[in-house]
Image (spheres, rainbow, N blue to C red):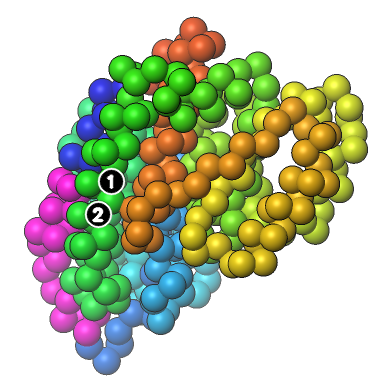
C-alpha cells in the first residue's frame, strides 16, 4: 500500500495518457451530432465510484450539463440515448455495476467502460463500446488516478470539458514534492499525515469538507480510514452541517471527547464558509476531542483536490500501522461478496 501510494504521481500521469490515447470509436461523432450529450453519469461502487464523485465536483465549475453518480443496480429514469455513462469497476466484476451497465445499454445510452478487465471489459467490448483498460493488481481505492483522470481526458476529447493537461501536470509535480514530506521516511515531527494518524488513534475521526469543493475529499478520507485502517469514521459538509450536526455536539458526553475533527480548507471555498468554520470551531471546539485544519496546496482545481487526497490516504495507512493492521486486505468486503455470490 505504501509503495502504491508513493507512486500515485506516476499513476496519475499514466492514467491521463491512457485516457488521451484510448480508442473512442464513433463516440466523438455521436456526441457531436444533433443528439449530443445532455448529462454525464458515472456508475460504480466503492473505490470505483469515488472517481465519479471527484469528477462531478470537478466538472461543476465549468460544465454546461449536469454530472451525476449512480451507486446502484439500476440507473435513474432520465438516463437515455443522450446520457454518456461511464461504467467504472476496477475488477470489472462488481454485480451492481454490471447490472447498471446492462440497464444503460437497454436504454440506448452512450457508454464508456473503465476497468482493469473482468466481465465489464468483455461485455463492453462485445457490445462495441469503448473500453479504457487500466493496469490491475492493486486495490481499487489505490487506483484513484486510474479511475478518475481518464474520464476527464475523454470528456475533454469530446469537447464537454476544457483542456486539463496543465492541471494534471501541476498535480503530478505537486504530489511528487509532497511525498517527500508525507512518505514513510519523513519523521512524524515534519509529517502531517503521521501527525493526523496519531490524533485519530483510538478516536473517531469526523471529516468536514465543503459542498462544491472538498465534499468528495471528505468522503474519500472517511472511506480510506474505513478500508485501510479498518476503523470507523464519518464525514459531513459545510454549510449543511451548520444546520443540524452542530447541534448534536451536546450528547453523549463520553463519546464527544473522543471525536477528532478535521476541517478541510480550499481556496475556492465560499468566503462565508471560511467564517462558518471559524465560528463553528469557537462554538464546539471545547466539546470535542480536537479539531485540525488541513489546507489544500497547489493552484489548479485538480492539484488542490489531489493534495488533500494524498494527505488523507497517507494518514489512513499510518493509522492502520498504529493499530497494527495491514491496510491492504478488505476481508469483510471479500467475505460479503463471496456470501452474496453463494446466495444466488
Ligand atoms: C476499494 C474496494 C471496494 C471496491 C468495491 C467495488 O479498495 O475494495 O470499495 O472498489 O467493492 O469493486 P470494484 O472497484 O472492483 O468495482
- Residue 256 % position (x, y): 81, 29
- Residue 83 % position (x, y): 37, 73
Q: Is residue 79 visible?
A: no
Quarter holding the N terminus is top left
Nearest to the observer: residue 96 or residue 344: 96
Q: Which residue is depicted at the point 39% across and 53% down?
A: 304
- Residue 328 % position (x, y): 38, 20
Horizontally, residue 150 falls left or right of residue 232, namely left
Horizontally, residue 54 falls left or right of residue 118, namely right
What is the crowding at mark 1: few (fewer than 14 residues within 10 Å), some, or many (at least 20)? some
What is the crowding at mark 2: few (fewer than 14 residues within 10 Å), some, or many (at least 20)? some
Q: Is residue 216 visible?
A: yes
Indicate which disc residue 107 carries: none
Question: Is the CB of the residue bearing disc 1 within 8 angstroms of ligand 1?
Answer: no
Q: Which residue is mark 2?
A: 170
Under circle 1, the secondary element is helix
Whether tag 2 and tag 1 are in contact, CB under 8 A, the answer is yes
Q: Name the chief secondary structure element in magenta.
A: helix
State the extent of the magenta-drawn residues as a range.
12-32
On screen, residue 6 above or below 301: above
Query: In the rendered structure, does residue 30 fall within the stretch colored magenta?
Result: yes
Q: Can you name the residue that lies furthest to the front here?
A: 189
Q: Which residue is depicted at the point 54% across and 51% down?
A: 265
Q: Which residue is depicted at the point 23% across and 28% down?
A: 137
Horizontally, residue 326 falls left or right of residue 274, namely left
Label tally: 2
Displayed quadrant of residue 310 = top left
On screen, residue 258 above or below 306: above
On screen, residue 340 above or below 270: above
Indicate which disc residue 174 carries: 1
Under circle 2, the secondary element is helix
Nearest to the observer: residue 55 or residue 319: 319
Amino acid at each position: 500500500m505504501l509503495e502504491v501510494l508513493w507512486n500515485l504521481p506516476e499513476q496519475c500521469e499514466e492514467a491521463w495518457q491512457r485516457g488521451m490515447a484510448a480508442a473512442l470509436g464513433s463516440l466523438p461523432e455521436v456526441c457531436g451530432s444533433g443528439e449530443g450529450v445532455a448529462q454525464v453519469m458515472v456508475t460504480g461502487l466503492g473505490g470505483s465510484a469515488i472517481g465519479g464523485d471527484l469528477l462531478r465536483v470537478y466538472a461543476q465549475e465549468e460544465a454546461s450539463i449536469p454530472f451525476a453518480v449512480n451507486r446502484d443496480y439500476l440507473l435513474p429514469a432520465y438516463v437515455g440515448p443522450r446520457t454518456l455513462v461511464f461504467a467504472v469497476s476496477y475488477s470489472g466484476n462488481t454485480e451492481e455495476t454490471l447490472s447498471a451497465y446492462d440497464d444503460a445499454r437497454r436504454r440506448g445510452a452512450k457508454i464508456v467502460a473503465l476497468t482493469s478487465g473482468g466481465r465489464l471489459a468483455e461485455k463492453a467490448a462485445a457490445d462495441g463500446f469503448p473500453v479504457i483498460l487500466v493496469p490491475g493488481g492493486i486495490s481499487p481505492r489505490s487506483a484513484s488516478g486510474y479511475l478518475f483522470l481518464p474520464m476527464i481526458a475523454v470528456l475533454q476529447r469530446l469537447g464537454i470539458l476544457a483542456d486539463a493537461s496543465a492541471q494534471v501536470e501541476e498535480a503530478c509535480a505537486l504530489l511528487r514534492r509532497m511525498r517527500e514530506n508525507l512518505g514513510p521516511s519523513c519523521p512524524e515531527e515534519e509529517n502531517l499525515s503521521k501527525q493526523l494518524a496519531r490524533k485519530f488513534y483510538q478516536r473517531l475521526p469526523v471529516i468536514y469538507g465543503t459542498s462544491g469543493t472538498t465534499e468528495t475529499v471528505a468522503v474519500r478520507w472517511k472511506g480510506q480510514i474505513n478500508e485501510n485502517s479498518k476503523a470507523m469514521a464519518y464525514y459531513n459538509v459545510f454549510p449543511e452541517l451548520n444546520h443540524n450536526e452542530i447541534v448534536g455536539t451536546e450528547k453523549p458526553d463520553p463519546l464527544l471527547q473522543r471525536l477528532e475533527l478535521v476541517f478541510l480548507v480550499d481556496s475556492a471555498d465560499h468566503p462565508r464558509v471560511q467564517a462558518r468554520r471559524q465560528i463553528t470551531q469557537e462554538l464546539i471546539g471545547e466539546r470535542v476531542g480536537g479539531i485540525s485544519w488541513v489546507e489544500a496546496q497547489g493552484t489548479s482545481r485538480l492539484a488542490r483536490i489531489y493534495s488533500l487526497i494524498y494527505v488523507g490516504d497517507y494518514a489512513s495507512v499510518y493509522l492502520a500501522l498504529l493499530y497494527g493492521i495491514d491496510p491492504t486486505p478488505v476481508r469483510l468486503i471479500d467475505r460479503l461478496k463471496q456470501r452474496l455470490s453463494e446466495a444466488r
